[in-house]
Amino acid sequence: MSYNPDSAVPFTLEETKSFVESHKWKYATTYAKTAPHEYLVKKWLSEEDRLLFERLVQTINKNSVIGYFYGHKNNYMILGDYYYWYMDYPENLAVDLINRTTTDYLEYNNGVYYYKERRISDSE
């Protein structure tokens, strides 16, 4: 019997906070000036934490709000000073990367969340 990531039980919000704070997120240097964010890759984690990663995916699914990044629709989970998301994958592929950035880059307008573009200069 194989493990189905979709059967993972979502975290409570307190468990979510504990999980995201206990892991090192990598800064996405490629997007540093245009879309500053960090990411966590599933394959970097221990086997046990990979199962917890799946719980985080399900937590995002359960607690998400609709948001847009340059016109692309995403599901965002807002938690504390961060919001979390993952990119849509074809149905037969599991999520293997979760992104996050601070809520400084999020704005709420007419009932919808939008990525608030803030281009970073070379001096920052």
Image (spheres, grey):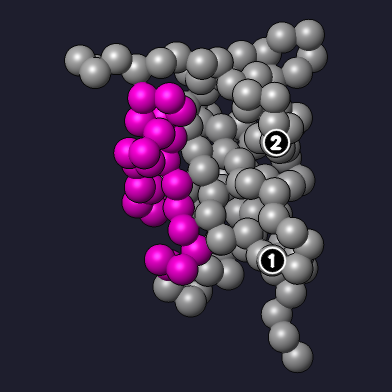
Whether residue 5 is in magenta: the answer is no
User: Residue 115: image x %, image y %?
Assistant: 59, 21
Would you say residue 11 is visible in this rendering?
Answer: no
Report the number of discs: 2
- Can you identify the residue that label 2 sits on? 74
Outermost left residue: 123
The residue shown at (51%, 43%) is 99
Nearest the viewer among 97 and 63 is 97
Would you say residue 67 is visible in this rendering?
Answer: yes
Q: Is residue 123 above or below residue 31?
A: above
User: Residue 80: image x %, image y %?
Assistant: 52, 29
The residue shown at (43%, 25%) is 34
Q: Earlier in the sequence, mark 1 or mark 2?
A: 2
Q: Amino acid at mark 1?
A: Leu
Q: Amino acid at mark 2?
A: Asn
Whether residue 25 is in magenta: the answer is yes
Dot 1 and dot 2 residues touching (CB under 8 Å): no
User: Residue 56: image x %, image y %?
Assistant: 61, 54
Q: Is residue 90 left or right of residue 45?
A: right
Q: Is residue 7 left or right of residue 81?
A: right
Nearest the viewer among 66 and 91 is 91
Q: What SS does tag 1 mark?
A: loop
Nearest the viewer among 89 and 43 is 89
- Can you identify the residue that label 1 sits on? 93
Q: Where does the magenta region start and end? A: 22-45
Q: Is residue 7 above or below residue 61?
A: below
Indicate the quadrant where residue 110 lies. top right
